[in-house]
Amino acid sequence: MSVHLFRDALDISASAMRAQGERLRQISENVANADTPGYRRKQASFETVLDSGVPTGTVVRGPVALDQRELQRIYDPGHPLADAEGYYDGSNVDLVVEIADAREAQRSYEANLRMFDQVRQMSRGILDILRR
Amino acid sequence: MLQSLDVLRLAKGLGEHAMFHQKVVAENVAQSDTPNYRARDVSSFRDMMSPDPGTPLRNTRPGHQGGHDAIPRMDAFVDLSAEAAPNGNSVSIEAEMVKSTEARRQFDLSLAVYRSSLDILRSALRAR
């Protein structure tokens, strides 16, 4: 039985779990800074890892980009950052978007965990034959 | 002797196919959030073992390869029937879960066949 298939499958699922974990970390960073003045939402996409031009199947988080949407204008004349009209720049984090994103990350993480577990159980099946 | 036992060879091929299928499914699930990724699939073991009924190649001498008895090479192809999400990704996690269960069942079947063949061999040796 080709052992490299097991290793490849485990590598692929593990890379995806790592990428989803990084995504969750970034989401919590955005949520934590939802009230930080001037904070721009961080976002990143997923990319397939290439090995000399050939897709390996493993996945990695792409470069981080800042959301260029306009910052929210908040009216608070008493705020130290407020300008002459009493407005200051808040963050452009949309909590609804972040929560939806977190749900999706969780769902993908669980699916990858299931794949990982299944491959592990399959390789144990082979070892059980050897052990008899 | 083990190499010449057809049932063991077939079980090995079935198990390898299931493992390959599982790897492709794991890859699809891993890429389920990658923009523009197209889901891939593997043809079933049955289709691979009985290709179109034309003039099948046969192994008539020991050195021949790729004949009717050989287990064909496995390859994944892009599943064009799958519908793509707005970001160009065509992986459906639900469909992948079904496929992975299928691969698991096929794998368990191959192991069960392998195990009982070994049991039969073992009892044959013991009877002597």
Image (cartoon, rainbow, N blue to C red):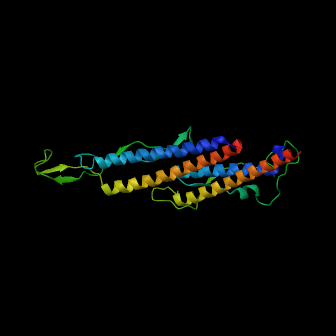
| In the image: residue A101, left or right of residue B109 | left
Q: Residue A63 is drawn in which quadrant?
A: top left
Q: Residue A8 is drawn in which quadrant?
A: top right
Asked if one can make out residue B69 in the rendered structure from this viewpoint, the answer is no
* Depth order, front residue of B122/B53: B122
At horizontal 35% and vertical 53% (from top left) the residue drawn is A98
Q: Is residue B55 above or below residue A130?
A: below
Q: In this view, does A56 lie above or below A69?
A: above
Asked if one can make out residue A99 in the rendered structure from this viewpoint, the answer is yes
Quadrant of image for the C terminus of chain B: top right
Residue occupying the far top of the picture: A52
| In the image: residue B39, left or right of residue A129 | left
Q: How many labels does the image show?
A: 0
Residue occupying the far front of the picture: B127
Give the percent coordinates (x, y) of residue B123: 82, 48
| In the image: residue B85, left or right of residue B27 | left
Give the percent coordinates (x, y) of residue B21: 63, 52
At horizontal 43% and vertical 48% (from top left) the residue drawn is A45
Quadrant of image for the N terminus of chain B: top right
Give the percent coordinates (x, y) of residue A20: 44, 47
At horizontal 60% and vertical 41% (from top left) the residue drawn is A7
* Depth order, front residue of B55/A41: A41
| In the image: residue B4, left or right of residue B109 | right
